[in-house]
Every structure is written in structure tokens, then in C-alpha cells.
Image (spheres, grey):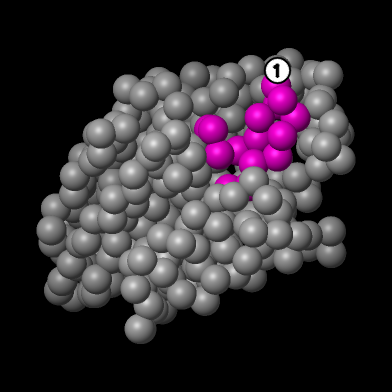
Amino acid sequence: MPRTGSRLLLASGSLVAAGALALAAPATSALAGGHPAQTDRPDRGHDRDVVNVPISNAGFTLPKDLKAGYVTFKATTSDPTGHTLQGFQLHEGVSLAKVDKEFRAATSSNPKTAAWGIRALMRDITAVGGPTVEPSTAVWDTIPLTRGTYWFVDLSQYFAPGGKPRFHKVEVEGKFCDCAPKHSAVIAEVNTKEGPRFKSRDSLELDGTFLVVNLGDEIHEAVFQRVKPGVTDRKLQQVFNQIVLGKTPKFNPFAEAAQRGVAAMSPGRVQFLHFAPRSGRYALLCFIPDEKLGIPHAFLGMHKIVRLH
């Protein structure tokens, strides 16, 4: 859900928790991928809206209204730090001012504050996800949106010095079009005895469309960051363990600072991710803060090395 700067700063060894969101999905068989699509390109599906969203530090624009169904947000940016477009719905009686305060807490580098913020967001909003994008790779994120009022914000503004988060209101109207995109692989966010984890193939088609589904009981995101040769999940965890202990790692496992993927979504929700970064080995990561400990899920083991080819 957040941008690169919201993750972890390996150079200084500081831990920066990522902000996040919350709750529930439309109860339809298509959310489990039960219906075929016209194409595996999310921007060309039958009866599907595509919203082009160039994002910069100056802001972004969205339509005032959209048709209910599987809506594709194609995000691009020229800003090297990247951006995360986060969509959500307010729960009854909750104000944007209250949610803004909770986002600020959830994106805090203080674990106690971040834990409070993420718990508050889980109570007060429903997270529907959105694209996380950086300059080298456009990201198509297809989200099921039922009738109602939605809000979108660029979460990177919570991390930028002097950043000014702006909320955009979108009305979704009409009958939900149950026509899910075709997908080539599934990325599941699941619970295990050890904590939240990713479940997916070790090798994924570079130009495929991935169904990302949250089967856990917490909020999760799914972003890809390229790793150096020889980096394993064990080595990655060793680095994260050092950061949690307040130490500066001697080894940076990442071959780049850039990240791309899908923003935070609530338990039970899905998104369809389509992108085409350079081939190679990537860490699949979730930096949403744990609701009890307030440190990123990735630090607790929610990471998986995969090959995109």
C-alpha cells in the first residue's frame, strides 16, 4: 500500500511501518475467479471501465462516477519514489478527518502508534486496494466495485516532507457486472501457525495477470521488489530481524529501491494485477503493520522470493 519510502530504510537501519486499511468484499462468485473473461489483458475486457491515472507529487485525477463492476486502474508515474493509490469506503458515521488521522498513525515509524492506526482503520473503513507504481513499470489493477461511495488517496503523501494527502470521491453506480478478468496465477495471502504468509507459485509469467486474494484475517498488500542474486527468503528474514532489533544490516538484499504491485485490501477482497517489469527474481512483500505489534508483516515472515519470466 505505501510507496518505497514507507517501507524500510536499509541504509540507516530504521524501521518505517506502512499504513493500511480494512474490511469486506462483494459476495459474488466472480470474486473467486468463477467466471471467464474475454481476455487476460485487464485493459481490454468486455464491459469493463479503464481509468488512466498518471500520479505525481502534484496529485492525480479520477472520474466523479464509474459503472459498477471490475474497474481497471492503469497507474503511471515519473516520480522516482513511486506512488500508491489506495481506495476505500467509509463505514457509517466515520469522517474523512478521522480517517486522515488514522492513516497518519498507521504510517508512523513508531510501532505502537502504527498498531493503533491500523486497528482504527480496520474498524472505520473498507479497503478495496489500488495500484502501487514506479516509473519503469505501468501497473494495471482491476478491482471489483459495487454500488456506493468510494474514496481514493495517494498514500505516498503521508511520507513525503510537507506532503498533502488529498481525498478524491468517486460514486459507483449501476448493477455489478460479474465478469472477472482471466488470470494466469493466484497470489494468496493466508494465515499460518507462524503468521501471515504468501502462497503462490515460485515462478510467475512475466506478462500475466495475477489474482491477488486476501484469505487472512488482517489487511495485506502485495508488492514486488527485485532482489540481488543469491538472496533467499532465509537471508531476507535475517536482514529484517536485524532491523527489528534496531541494527543496521551490513547487506542490502534488494537490487532496486522501486516497488510495484497492489495496495492494501481487507480480508475476503480480491484484486487482479497486471504489469510487465524486467524479468528476474523478486521478493513478494507485505509491509502493512501488524495490528498487535505494529511492525510490517514482511518483518514477521510475510515475504516470498519468486521468479518473473
Residue 147 placement, left or right of 63? right
Q: Tell me the kind of residue under disc 1.
A: Lys
Residue 184 lies within the magenta run: no
Residue 5 lies within the magenta run: yes
Stretch of the chain drawn in magenta:
4-18
Residue 214 placement, left or right of 180? right
Residue carrying label 1: 228
Q: Quadrant of residue 10?
A: top right
Secondary element type, mark 1: loop
Q: Is residue 121 visible?
A: yes
Q: Nearer the viewer, residue 190 or 9?
A: 9
Q: Nearer the viewer, residue 169 or 209?
A: 169
For label 1, the crowd category at 10 Å Cα-Cα, with few meaning under 14, some 14 to 19 and many 20 or more, is: some
Residue 284 location, x and y as percent? 63, 39
Residue at point 41% right, 60% down?
Answer: 100
* Label total for image: 1
Q: Nearer the viewer, residue 171 or 179?
A: 171
| Residue 136 drawn above or below residue 157 | above
Q: Is residue 198 visible?
A: no
Residue at point 84% right, 59% down?
Answer: 194
Residue 94 location, x and y as percent? 37, 77
Residue 70 location, x and y as percent? 28, 59
| Residue 306 drawn above or below residue 290 | above
Quarter of the rendering occupied by the C terminus = top right
Residue at point 68% right, 51% down?
Answer: 110
Q: Nearer the viewer, residue 278 or 255?
A: 255
Point out the residue furthest to the bottom here: 92
Residue 163 location, x and y as percent? 38, 39
Residue at point 34% right, 73% down?
Answer: 95
Residue 176 placement, left or right of 214? left
